[in-house]
Image (cartoon, rainbow, N blue to C red):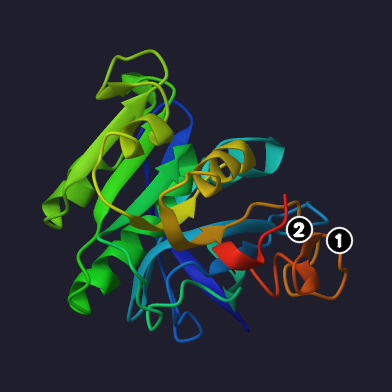
Amino acid sequence: MKKTLFTLERVRRLAGDIWELRLSGDTSAITVPGQFVNIELPGKFLRRPISVCDWGPGSLTLLVKEAGEGTKELVRLPAGTELDVLSGLGNGFDLTRAPENAVNTFLVGGGIGAAPLYGLAKRMLAAEWKPALILGFRSQEDAFYLEEFAALGLEVHAATEDGSLGTKGFVTDVLKTLPGCAYLLACGPTPMLKAVHALPRLTGGQFSFEARMACGFGACVGCTIQTKKGLRRVCKDGPIFHKEDIVW
Protein backbone atom coordinates (compact mmCIF):
# COMPACT_ATOMS: atom_id res chain seq x y z
CA MET A 1 0.00 0.00 0.00
CA LYS A 2 1.21 3.48 -0.84
CA LYS A 3 -0.26 6.88 0.01
CA THR A 4 0.40 9.54 -2.60
CA LEU A 5 -1.11 12.42 -4.55
CA PHE A 6 -2.54 11.84 -8.02
CA THR A 7 -3.60 14.55 -10.46
CA LEU A 8 -6.91 14.18 -12.29
CA GLU A 9 -6.09 14.65 -15.97
CA ARG A 10 -9.38 13.86 -17.73
CA VAL A 11 -12.95 12.75 -17.06
CA ARG A 12 -15.09 11.15 -19.76
CA ARG A 13 -18.66 9.90 -19.56
CA LEU A 14 -18.98 6.40 -21.03
CA ALA A 15 -22.64 5.61 -20.37
CA GLY A 16 -25.47 6.96 -18.22
CA ASP A 17 -23.81 6.60 -14.82
CA ILE A 18 -20.38 5.26 -15.83
CA TRP A 19 -17.36 7.53 -16.09
CA GLU A 20 -13.72 7.07 -17.08
CA LEU A 21 -11.10 8.93 -15.06
CA ARG A 22 -7.50 9.35 -16.18
CA LEU A 23 -5.00 10.30 -13.49
CA SER A 24 -1.26 10.82 -13.29
CA GLY A 25 0.89 9.85 -10.32
CA ASP A 26 3.05 7.17 -8.77
CA THR A 27 1.58 3.77 -9.68
CA SER A 28 4.51 1.69 -8.42
CA ALA A 29 2.38 0.06 -5.68
CA ILE A 30 -0.04 -1.39 -8.25
CA THR A 31 1.43 -4.74 -9.26
CA VAL A 32 -1.41 -7.00 -10.46
CA PRO A 33 -4.81 -6.55 -12.14
CA GLY A 34 -7.76 -6.70 -9.77
CA GLN A 35 -6.27 -4.43 -7.12
CA PHE A 36 -8.04 -1.22 -6.14
CA VAL A 37 -7.33 2.30 -4.91
CA ASN A 38 -8.97 4.22 -2.07
CA ILE A 39 -9.59 7.90 -2.79
CA GLU A 40 -10.03 10.65 -0.21
CA LEU A 41 -12.67 13.25 -1.05
CA PRO A 42 -12.94 16.70 0.53
CA GLY A 43 -15.45 16.73 3.39
CA LYS A 44 -15.99 12.96 3.35
CA PHE A 45 -14.99 10.85 6.34
CA LEU A 46 -14.52 7.60 4.41
CA ARG A 47 -12.44 7.09 1.30
CA ARG A 48 -14.02 5.67 -1.88
CA PRO A 49 -12.66 2.28 -3.07
CA ILE A 50 -12.39 2.10 -6.87
CA SER A 51 -11.15 -0.85 -8.95
CA VAL A 52 -8.10 -0.24 -11.11
CA CYS A 53 -9.08 -0.47 -14.76
CA ASP A 54 -5.57 -0.06 -16.15
CA TRP A 55 -2.24 1.43 -15.20
CA GLY A 56 1.21 2.19 -16.53
CA PRO A 57 4.25 4.14 -15.39
CA GLY A 58 2.80 7.39 -14.04
CA SER A 59 -0.72 6.81 -15.36
CA LEU A 60 -3.89 5.35 -13.85
CA THR A 61 -7.28 4.65 -15.43
CA LEU A 62 -10.38 4.20 -13.31
CA LEU A 63 -13.96 3.43 -14.31
CA VAL A 64 -16.41 4.84 -11.80
CA LYS A 65 -20.11 4.14 -11.33
CA GLU A 66 -21.98 7.15 -9.99
CA ALA A 67 -23.66 5.47 -7.03
CA GLY A 68 -23.82 8.07 -4.24
CA GLU A 69 -22.81 11.55 -3.16
CA GLY A 70 -19.11 10.70 -3.02
CA THR A 71 -18.81 9.23 -6.51
CA LYS A 72 -21.12 11.96 -7.86
CA GLU A 73 -18.66 14.56 -6.62
CA LEU A 74 -15.63 12.56 -7.78
CA VAL A 75 -16.67 12.33 -11.43
CA ARG A 76 -17.43 16.07 -11.55
CA LEU A 77 -14.10 17.27 -10.24
CA PRO A 78 -12.24 19.53 -12.69
CA ALA A 79 -9.07 18.47 -14.47
CA GLY A 80 -6.02 19.41 -12.43
CA THR A 81 -7.57 18.42 -9.09
CA GLU A 82 -5.11 16.68 -6.76
CA LEU A 83 -6.44 13.57 -5.02
CA ASP A 84 -5.03 11.79 -1.98
CA VAL A 85 -4.92 8.11 -3.00
CA LEU A 86 -4.05 4.85 -1.30
CA SER A 87 -2.87 2.53 -4.06
CA GLY A 88 -1.86 -1.10 -4.37
CA LEU A 89 -4.73 -2.40 -2.23
CA GLY A 90 -6.08 -5.95 -2.49
CA ASN A 91 -4.58 -9.18 -3.76
CA GLY A 92 -5.47 -9.11 -7.48
CA PHE A 93 -5.92 -11.92 -10.01
CA ASP A 94 -3.37 -14.74 -10.05
CA LEU A 95 -1.98 -15.12 -13.57
CA THR A 96 0.43 -17.86 -12.55
CA ARG A 97 -2.43 -20.25 -11.89
CA ALA A 98 -3.19 -22.04 -15.16
CA PRO A 99 -6.66 -23.50 -15.77
CA GLU A 100 -7.05 -27.18 -15.00
CA ASN A 101 -9.00 -29.36 -17.45
CA ALA A 102 -10.46 -26.26 -19.10
CA VAL A 103 -10.95 -25.99 -22.83
CA ASN A 104 -11.85 -22.31 -22.70
CA THR A 105 -11.00 -19.34 -20.49
CA PHE A 106 -13.46 -16.48 -20.14
CA LEU A 107 -13.43 -13.06 -18.58
CA VAL A 108 -16.94 -12.35 -17.28
CA GLY A 109 -18.14 -8.94 -16.14
CA GLY A 110 -21.44 -7.46 -15.04
CA GLY A 111 -21.91 -3.70 -15.31
CA ILE A 112 -19.08 -1.78 -13.64
CA GLY A 113 -17.52 -5.19 -12.95
CA ALA A 114 -16.03 -4.86 -16.44
CA ALA A 115 -13.54 -2.31 -15.07
CA PRO A 116 -10.72 -4.52 -13.71
CA LEU A 117 -11.08 -6.97 -16.58
CA TYR A 118 -9.54 -4.52 -19.06
CA GLY A 119 -6.15 -4.37 -17.36
CA LEU A 120 -6.43 -8.09 -16.69
CA ALA A 121 -7.04 -8.82 -20.37
CA LYS A 122 -3.99 -6.80 -21.43
CA ARG A 123 -1.72 -8.68 -19.08
CA MET A 124 -3.19 -12.08 -19.92
CA LEU A 125 -2.56 -11.41 -23.61
CA ALA A 126 1.00 -10.34 -22.83
CA ALA A 127 1.42 -13.70 -21.07
CA GLU A 128 0.05 -15.49 -24.19
CA TRP A 129 -3.10 -16.52 -22.33
CA LYS A 130 -5.93 -15.48 -24.65
CA PRO A 131 -9.39 -15.46 -23.06
CA ALA A 132 -12.76 -14.59 -24.54
CA LEU A 133 -14.85 -11.87 -22.94
CA ILE A 134 -18.50 -11.81 -21.85
CA LEU A 135 -20.03 -8.60 -20.52
CA GLY A 136 -23.55 -8.14 -19.20
CA PHE A 137 -25.55 -4.90 -19.08
CA ARG A 138 -29.14 -3.82 -18.51
CA SER A 139 -29.44 -2.42 -22.04
CA GLN A 140 -27.39 -1.18 -24.99
CA GLU A 141 -27.48 2.33 -23.50
CA ASP A 142 -25.68 1.05 -20.41
CA ALA A 143 -22.92 -0.75 -22.34
CA PHE A 144 -19.37 0.56 -22.33
CA TYR A 145 -15.79 -0.40 -23.22
CA LEU A 146 -16.81 -3.02 -25.78
CA GLU A 147 -14.75 -1.31 -28.48
CA GLU A 148 -11.76 -0.96 -26.15
CA PHE A 149 -11.81 -4.68 -25.36
CA ALA A 150 -12.27 -5.58 -29.04
CA ALA A 151 -9.28 -3.40 -29.95
CA LEU A 152 -7.13 -5.67 -27.81
CA GLY A 153 -8.05 -8.54 -30.12
CA LEU A 154 -10.44 -10.34 -27.77
CA GLU A 155 -13.50 -12.27 -28.86
CA VAL A 156 -16.23 -10.15 -27.27
CA HIS A 157 -19.74 -11.32 -26.31
CA ALA A 158 -22.42 -9.08 -24.81
CA ALA A 159 -25.67 -9.83 -23.02
CA THR A 160 -28.41 -7.34 -22.17
CA GLU A 161 -31.46 -7.89 -20.03
CA ASP A 162 -33.75 -6.29 -22.62
CA GLY A 163 -32.08 -7.86 -25.67
CA SER A 164 -31.10 -4.51 -27.20
CA LEU A 165 -27.49 -5.69 -27.61
CA GLY A 166 -26.10 -9.19 -28.04
CA THR A 167 -27.81 -12.09 -26.29
CA LYS A 168 -31.04 -11.35 -24.45
CA GLY A 169 -30.61 -12.29 -20.83
CA PHE A 170 -27.55 -12.60 -18.61
CA VAL A 171 -23.90 -13.60 -18.93
CA THR A 172 -24.87 -17.12 -17.88
CA ASP A 173 -27.11 -17.37 -20.96
CA VAL A 174 -24.09 -16.65 -23.16
CA LEU A 175 -21.88 -19.11 -21.28
CA LYS A 176 -24.44 -21.88 -21.75
CA THR A 177 -24.15 -21.50 -25.56
CA LEU A 178 -20.36 -21.79 -25.65
CA PRO A 179 -18.85 -25.29 -25.87
CA GLY A 180 -16.31 -26.93 -23.63
CA CYS A 181 -15.32 -26.81 -20.00
CA ALA A 182 -14.54 -23.34 -18.77
CA TYR A 183 -12.24 -21.46 -16.41
CA LEU A 184 -13.59 -18.03 -15.45
CA LEU A 185 -12.19 -14.79 -14.12
CA ALA A 186 -15.22 -12.77 -13.08
CA CYS A 187 -16.19 -9.47 -11.53
CA GLY A 188 -19.68 -8.13 -10.95
CA PRO A 189 -22.63 -8.02 -8.56
CA THR A 190 -23.01 -10.89 -6.10
CA PRO A 191 -26.08 -12.47 -7.82
CA MET A 192 -24.11 -12.69 -11.06
CA LEU A 193 -21.08 -14.22 -9.36
CA LYS A 194 -23.26 -16.75 -7.57
CA ALA A 195 -25.03 -17.77 -10.80
CA VAL A 196 -21.75 -18.12 -12.67
CA HIS A 197 -20.19 -20.10 -9.81
CA ALA A 198 -23.05 -22.62 -10.02
CA LEU A 199 -22.50 -23.48 -13.71
CA PRO A 200 -21.94 -27.25 -13.94
CA ARG A 201 -19.11 -27.18 -16.50
CA LEU A 202 -17.03 -24.66 -14.60
CA THR A 203 -13.68 -26.29 -13.78
CA GLY A 204 -12.32 -23.41 -11.73
CA GLY A 205 -12.09 -19.68 -11.55
CA GLN A 206 -11.27 -16.48 -9.75
CA PHE A 207 -14.02 -14.16 -8.52
CA SER A 208 -13.70 -10.49 -7.60
CA PHE A 209 -16.06 -9.61 -4.75
CA GLU A 210 -17.69 -6.31 -3.90
CA ALA A 211 -18.15 -5.17 -0.30
CA ARG A 212 -18.68 -2.02 1.73
CA MET A 213 -15.22 -0.98 2.87
CA ALA A 214 -14.36 1.53 5.57
CA CYS A 215 -10.57 1.44 5.76
CA GLY A 216 -9.69 -0.56 2.63
CA PHE A 217 -6.63 -2.26 4.12
CA GLY A 218 -7.98 -4.75 6.68
CA ALA A 219 -7.87 -2.77 9.93
CA CYS A 220 -11.60 -2.40 10.57
CA VAL A 221 -12.63 -5.95 9.47
CA GLY A 222 -15.94 -4.49 8.31
CA CYS A 223 -15.91 -6.34 4.98
CA THR A 224 -15.34 -9.84 6.41
CA ILE A 225 -16.95 -12.80 4.62
CA GLN A 226 -17.07 -16.53 5.33
CA THR A 227 -14.96 -18.80 3.12
CA LYS A 228 -13.98 -22.47 3.29
CA LYS A 229 -10.72 -21.28 4.85
CA GLY A 230 -12.56 -19.32 7.53
CA LEU A 231 -13.32 -15.62 7.81
CA ARG A 232 -11.57 -13.44 5.25
CA ARG A 233 -11.52 -9.67 4.62
CA VAL A 234 -12.56 -8.66 1.10
CA CYS A 235 -10.26 -5.62 1.13
CA LYS A 236 -7.14 -7.36 2.44
CA ASP A 237 -7.48 -11.08 1.65
CA GLY A 238 -9.51 -10.35 -1.49
CA PRO A 239 -11.13 -8.94 -3.44
CA ILE A 240 -10.17 -11.97 -5.52
CA PHE A 241 -11.16 -15.41 -4.20
CA HIS A 242 -10.73 -18.76 -5.94
CA LYS A 243 -13.80 -20.80 -6.83
CA GLU A 244 -13.01 -23.67 -4.48
CA ASP A 245 -12.80 -21.34 -1.45
CA ILE A 246 -16.11 -19.53 -1.90
CA VAL A 247 -19.09 -20.07 0.41
CA TRP A 248 -22.44 -18.55 -0.55
Dots 2, 1 in contact, CB < 8 A? yes
Report which residue position mark 1 lands on. Answer: 222
Residue 97 lies, with reference to residue 153, above or below; the image says below
- 140 vs 73, left or right, is left
Q: Residue at x 78, y 52 (%)?
A: 44
Out of 17 and 42, give the one closest to the viewer.
Answer: 17
Residue type (three-letter) at the residue carrying disc 2: Met
At label 2, counting other C-alpha atoms closer than 10 Å, the crowd grade (few under 14, some 14-19, many 20 or more) is many
Q: Residue at x 76, y 68 (%)?
A: 233
Residue 168 lies, with reference to residue 149, above or below; the image says above
Q: Residue at x 29, y 14 (%)?
A: 164
Can residue 81 be spotted in the picture? no
Residue 102 lies, with reference to residue 144, above or below; the image says below
At label 1, counting other C-alpha atoms closer than 10 Å, the crowd grade (few under 14, some 14-19, many 20 or more) is some
Circle 1 sits in a helix, a strand or a loop, which is it? Answer: loop
Circle 2 sits in a helix, a strand or a loop, which is it? Answer: loop
Numbered mark located on residue 97 in the image:
none
Q: Position of residue 228 (x, y in %)?
A: 74, 68
Q: Position of residue 125 (x, y in %)?
A: 20, 70
- 219 vs 136, left or right, is right
Can residue 130 be spotted in the picture? yes
Residue type (three-letter) at the residue carrying disc 1: Gly
Out of 11 and 20, give the one closest to the viewer.
Answer: 20
Report which residue position mark 2 lands on. Answer: 213
Q: Earlier in the sequence, mark 2 or mark 1?
A: 2
- 129 vs 218, left or right, is left
Gap in angstroms between the C-alphas marked 2 and 1: 7 Å
Specify the quadrant of the image occupied by residue 213: bottom right
Q: Position of residue 198 (x, y in %)?
A: 55, 44
Give the position of the N terminus as an image quadrant: bottom right
Q: Position of residue 235 (x, y in %)?
A: 70, 67
